[in-house]
Amino acid sequence: MKKFGLVLILLAGLMACAPLTAPEAEVTPVVITVVVPPSETPTPDAPAVPSDTPPPADTPAPPPPTATTGPQCTVLQRLNFRKGPGTAFNPPIDVLDKAAVVRPVGFSANGFPSGSWVQAVDAAGRTGWVSAGAQFISCNVDVNSLPAVAAEPPPAPRPPSVSNSQPQGTFDGFEYELIFSSRSLLRIALRATGTANDGDGVKQVKFIVQDKDGNPVYEKTEGKAAFCIFGGDDPSCNPWPVNQYQLTWGEGGPAAVNGTYKVRIEAEGVDEFGSDIFGNWRFEVTLGPP
């Protein structure tokens, strides 16, 4: 009994010394690493560059690409785009604006009537010709190295359309009719008042033509009917003179280009009583496309 009691006393002492609650277990933290695979294509504003790659050195940006590659010519001023190599090819296909770009494909050293010309394709895909003068086009190739193109001569020039203003002046003592024609431009049916036939009582008729600025371009005097500005007889007055595939103001005169001209007709004659009479007609003539 004494041994049993001693055991109980020892157990009671141990229980009095033990804590009332069990001690907390030690927690070991767990680290979870999430690995995100790299994207196959970097975003535009964040390119994927390895951290050990140095940034690129500053380099000048490349020049912007041109609209076309290969031979090209730039038009330096408004320029006619013609069917053939020369001003004789009328009317033009079109007019090219300044800074227009064409593709040169051929060359003619001797145009009609003169000059060197470049065959080119415009932005609309049309093939035509432009003057090769340095004041008209600037090319990135030597135009003389382009393939030579043998062009057929142009057809005979077509006469222009003709319109006129109302004549003014002093023409008492004459009976007259002004007759305009695209083929032969002008003749005047003229006689002294009271006479019967064209040319009766008329000594001479002088035709004087000036450009719009008053510069003389043509003059001719006729002494007998029919009184045609380029000579000849009624009903077939001489047609427009032609030189180097161009209509001209008389043989060897300046080219008759479209525009307005000042025309004056001066006539001298005698009336039915033998007195001198004088006539003066002034008007404008406008030449236009055929």
Image (cartoon, rainbow, N blue to C red):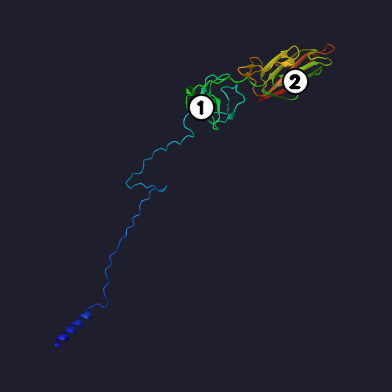
| In front of the other: 11 or 234 | 234
Mark 2 = which residue? 179
Image location of residue 201, percent across then percent down: 80, 12
The image's mark for residue 164 is none
Figure quadrant of the N terminus: bottom left
- Residue type, numbered disc 1: Pro
User: Tag 2, which secondary structure?
Assistant: strand
Q: Earlier in the sequence, mark 1 or mark 2?
A: 1
Label count reads 2
Residue 116 image point, x, y percent: 53, 21
The residue depicted at 51 percent of the width and 27 percent of the height is: 104
Task: Specify whether residue 132 is in view.
Answer: no
Res. 169 visible in picture: yes
Examine the image and state in which quarter residue 93 appears: top right
Task: Identify the residue at image location x=76%, y=15%.
Answer: 267
Return the mark for residue 104: 1
Residue furthest out toward the bottom:
1
* Kind of residue at disc 2: Ile
Q: Place residue 3 in its image quadrant.
A: bottom left
Q: In the picture shown, does residue 13 fall above or below 120?
A: below
> Separation of disc 1 and disc 2 at Cα?
47 Å
Secondary element under disc 1, as helix, strand or loop, is strand
Q: Residue 85: x and y, percent?
A: 56, 22
How many residues crowd mark 1 within 10 Å: few (<14), some (14–19), many (20+)?
many
